[in-house]
Amino acid sequence: MKGKRFTEEQIIRILHEAESGLSVADICRKHNCSEQSFYRWKAKFGGLEISEAKRLRELERENGELKKIVAEQTLDMRMLKDVNSRKW
């Protein structure tokens, strides 16, 4: 069973609640999330503002696209080297 998905904005608001002095257990109970998820979010989004989180998501998407392009280029180069190395 897949758990509840939180947006970056919701995660950052939850993390800001923790910074205001509430205990982690109370915050997790209030938002129905595990403490493990909270600490994972804190490692990834700790100290970020909402606009920075949106920018981070955009950079991760762009990075994924660039990795795909590099992989395709590498395959093309290997294929051309293989074809070129054959004796006709």
Image (tube, rainbow, N blue to C red):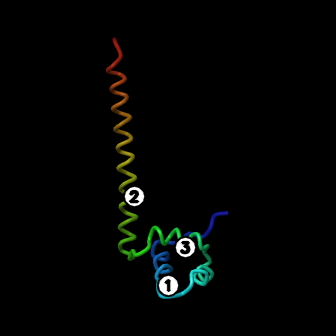
Amino acid carrying mark 1 in the image: Glu
Few, some or many residues within 10 Å of mark 1 (<14, 14–19, 20+): some
Mark 1 or 2, nearer chain start: 1
Amino acid carrying mark 3 in the image: Phe
The alpha-carbon separation of the residues under discs 3 and 1 comes to 11 Å
The circle drawn on residue 71 is none
The mark closer to the camera, 2 or 3, is 3
Viewer-proximal residue, 48 or 53?
Answer: 48
* Image x and y of residue 32, in percent: 62, 77
Q: Going by the picture, which residue comes out furthest to the top?
A: 88
Q: Quadrant of the C terminus?
A: top left
Q: Secondary structure at mark 1?
A: helix
* Image x and y of residue 75, in percent: 38, 34
Amino acid carrying mark 2 in the image: Arg
The circle drawn on residue 17 is 1
Q: Secondary structure at mark 2?
A: helix
The circle drawn on residue 61 is 2
Residue at label 3? 38
Residue visible at 50% across and 70% down in the picture:
41
Residue visible at 39% across and 74% down in the picture:
48
